[in-house]
Image (cartoon, rainbow, N blue to C red):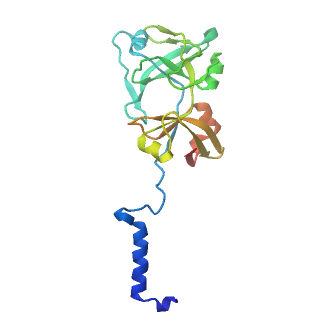
Amino acid sequence: MSIATLDRTYIERLVRSALSEQFGNGKARSVRAAAPPKLVVNVSARHCHVTQEDLERLFGTGHKLTPYKALYQDGFFAAEETVTLIGPRHRMITGLRILGPCRDHSQVELAFTDAIMLGLDIPVRKSGDHRDSPGAYLLGPAGMVHLERGVIRHERHVHMGPADAAYYGVKDGDRLNLRVESDCPTVLESLLVRVAPTSKLEVHLDTDEGNACHVNRATRFELFK
C-alpha cells in the first residue's frame, strides 16, 4: 500500500496498536532504558579517623571537631584539626587531616606511596578491618596517641543508596568495575559496593589510583559488572 492510498481508518489502527504496546494493561512502558544515575568520582587523599577519646588525647579534654569543608556524603566533613603521623625510624607526615564525625575506632588511610615513604607495609582493607595492619603514632598539640594497628590502604569502593543498587543489580559487599575515559584511559576492577539508605552514588579512589588514570582530566566514568 502506498503512502498516497493510506486512509484515516488504517492510520488510526496503526496508532492504536502502537499505543497498546507502549501502554499495555494501563501501565506505561519505558521506550528506552532508564538513564544512569549521576555518578561522582572523588579522590580521597590521605587522612585519619579518630574516636572522641583519642581526639581529646590529641587536642585536650572536651575538644570537638570543627568542620572545615563538607564532604559529598551528607553529614561527613573534613575537619580543621590536623595531626602529625609518625612511622618507623621517626619518618613522619605532617598536616594529616582528620575527617569527621568521630568514629568508634581510630584509623589512618594512606596511599601506597605514602606508606612506602613512612616505611610501612600496609594492607588493602575495608574501613574498620584492621587485621594484620601496622600501627603508628599520632601527634597533636595536647598529646600523642599510639595506634597499635589501623594504618591501611582503604580499598577502592563505591557508595550508593538502595535505588542505585537496584539500577546496577548489586547489593552491599558486591563488586563493580569502573571505566575511566581520560588521556590515561583505565579500567579499575573490583570496587567494593557499600550500600546505605542515605548514601549518594560516589566512587572513592586514593591518590595513587586517581593519578594513574588522570582522573582530573576524565571525560566520562562508567560503572559496570
As drawn, which residue projects farthest toward the bottom? 5
Above or below — where is 147 with respect to 205?
A: above
Q: Is residue 210 left or right of residue 11?
A: right
Query: Whole-percent x and y of residue 214?
Result: 62, 40
In this rendered view, identify the residue nearer to me: 143 or 26: 26
Residue placed farthest to the front in the image?
Answer: 25
Q: Nearer the viewer, residue 23 or 201?
A: 23
Q: Residue at x 53, y 16 (%)?
A: 150
The residue at the point 61 percent across, 9 percent down is 90
Residue 40 picture location, percent across and down: 49, 42
Q: State whether residue 167 is above or below residue 68.
A: below
**As rendered, which of 135 and 90 lies closer to the eye?**
135
Q: Which is nearer the eye, 134 or 21?
A: 21
Q: Residue 72 is drawn in which quadrant?
A: top left
Query: Measuring 41% from the left and 29% from the top, which residue is drawn there?
Result: 77
Quarter of the figure that contains the C terminus = top right
| Residue 124 x, y percent position in the rendering | 60, 25
In the figure, residue 12 lies in which quadrant? bottom left
How many numbered discs, if any?
0
- Vertical side of 210 occupied by 18: above or below: below
Horizontal side of 202 relative to 115 (left or right) equals left
* Residue at position x 58%, y 45% in the image: 218
Q: Is residue 84 left or right of residue 73?
A: right
